[in-house]
Amino acid sequence: MKVKLVDVKHYDKDRNENPLITRNNKPYIRCVLKTAKGTISGFGSTITKQWKSGDEVDIEIDVKEVNGVKYQNFKLPDQRVSREEFNLLSKKVKFLEDEIGFLHKKLEPETKDNTLDDFDLGDPPDGEDYNAPI
């Protein structure tokens, strides 16, 4: 479901300034979204950190009732692609890489590979040899 964000907040501590911890004792970030339809909370991520007021985002909303109080939680939709979609995208990327390579060769001026033999370096200082291994 697409929702338009009025406000986005991220928290890593509760109201008492204690770190937010999952049931498995792992820290997490809580993301609270304010929309025209109400407030929705969920787990924060690198994706939610990019959201800002005015953005329209795609989320899945789950309504739960606990002790007579309704809570709305969100999660990000599944981002996996099918094998067919992956193969199609791979072909498109390969095509674009080939086209970029072709254009790069067209735009690149012809150059000659220069070697040390093409330059007159003069005589080496006493005790040095230009051909000595480095």
Image: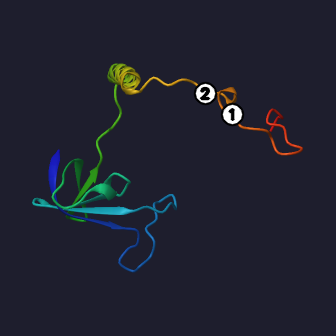
Residue under label 1, please give it: 120
Labels 1 and 2 touching (C-beta < 8 A): no
Mark 2 Cα-neighbour bin, 10 Å: few <14, some 14–19, many ≥20: few
Instruction: State the separation of the CA atoms marked 1 and 2.
Output: 12 Å
| Residue 121 drawn at (x, y percent) | 71, 37
Q: Please state which of residues 36 and 61 is positioned toward the viewer in this rendering.
A: 36
Give above or below for 15 relative to 75: below
Q: Is residue 127 left or right of residue 10?
A: right
Q: Please state which of residues 52 and 121 is positioned toward the viewer in this rendering.
A: 121
Please tell me whether mark 1 sits on a helix, a strand or a loop: loop
Please tell me whether mark 2 sits on a helix, a strand or a loop: loop
Residue 128 placement: quadrant: top right
Q: In this view, does 15 lie to the left or right of 127?
A: left
Give above or below for 41 relative to 78: below
| Residue 62 drawn at (x, y percent) | 24, 50
| Residue 37 drawn at (x, y percent) | 10, 59
Amino acid type, residue under disc 1 in the picture:
Asp
| Residue 11 drawn at (x, y percent) | 36, 68
Q: Please state which of residues 4 and 72 is positioned toward the viewer in this rendering.
A: 4
In the displayed orientation, state which residue is furthest to the bottom: 16
Residue under label 2, please give it: 114
Amino acid type, residue under disc 2 in the picture:
Asn
Mark 1 Cα-neighbour bin, 10 Å: few <14, some 14–19, many ≥20: few
Seen at 69% across and 27% down, the residue is 117
